[in-house]
Amino acid sequence: MFLGEFTHKVDSKNRIMMPSEFRENLKGDFYITKGPENSLIIYTEEEFVKQSQKLDERINESKKNRAIKRLFFSSTVKISLDKQGRILLNKNLKDYSGIKDEAMIIGNNTTIELWDRERWQAYIDEVEVNLSDIMDE
């Protein structure tokens, strides 16, 4: 389970240190792809397989589902931690997310989200203002 919120710098080679709390569950290969609100989502191998199966089950249901599947798999990159516990963001994912100097690393139960620090703060400011309404829905 991934929990918490961490701020980490992006180095000159587009590498981001993963929080030590997350590294144990990121052994071997895992996957990073585009997510909602210009976030990036990291899936463990197990979660990636689950997500892939869900997408495969719905491929022929609609044009929208086929588009989602194409975008999901075409933007997904298999990665692993380097010896220092960092991940490398490729240009496509970095540009999509708008991550610059600092990234927010967000535990979201079975996945990890990466956000540009300023974009995350704007998102949180917006959500927290409406939190009661959101929870009521």
Image (spheres, helix red, strand yellow):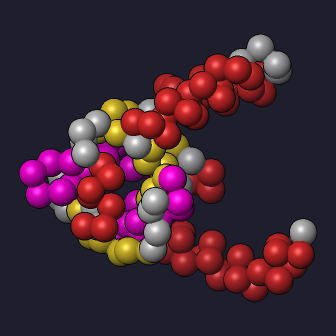
Q: Tell me residue 45's x, y (percent).
A: 40, 36
Q: Residue at x 44, y 74 (%)?
A: 5
Asked if residue 1 lies left or right of residue 55, the reply is left
Magenta span of residues: 81-110
- Quarter holding the C terminus is bottom right
When the figure is inspected, residue 42 is found, relative to residue 5, above or below; the finding is: above
Q: Tell me residue 64's x, y (percent).
A: 78, 27
Q: Which residue appears farthest toward the left when viewing the image?
A: 83
Q: Tell me residue 35's x, y (percent).
A: 57, 47
When the figure is inspected, residue 48 is found, relative to residue 95, above or below; the finding is: above
Q: Which residue appears farthest toward the right when viewing the image?
A: 137
**Residue 123 in view:** yes
Q: Residue at x 46, y 69 (%)?
A: 3
Closer-to-camera residue (135/121): 135
When the figure is inspected, residue 73 is found, relative to residue 46, above or below; the finding is: above
How many labels were placed on the picture? Answer: 0
Closer-to-camera residue (17/24): 24
Q: Tell me residue 8's x, y (percent).
A: 30, 71
Q: Residue at x 9, y 51 (%)?
A: 83
Asked if residue 38 lies left or right of residue 43, the reply is right
Asked if residue 106 lies left or right of residue 27, the reply is right
Asked if residue 5 lies left or right of residue 21, the reply is right
Q: Residue at x 38, y 74 (%)?
A: 6
Q: Is residue 125 magenta?
A: no
Q: Is residue 98 magenta?
A: yes
Closer-to-camera residue (12/88): 88
**Residue 98 in view:** no
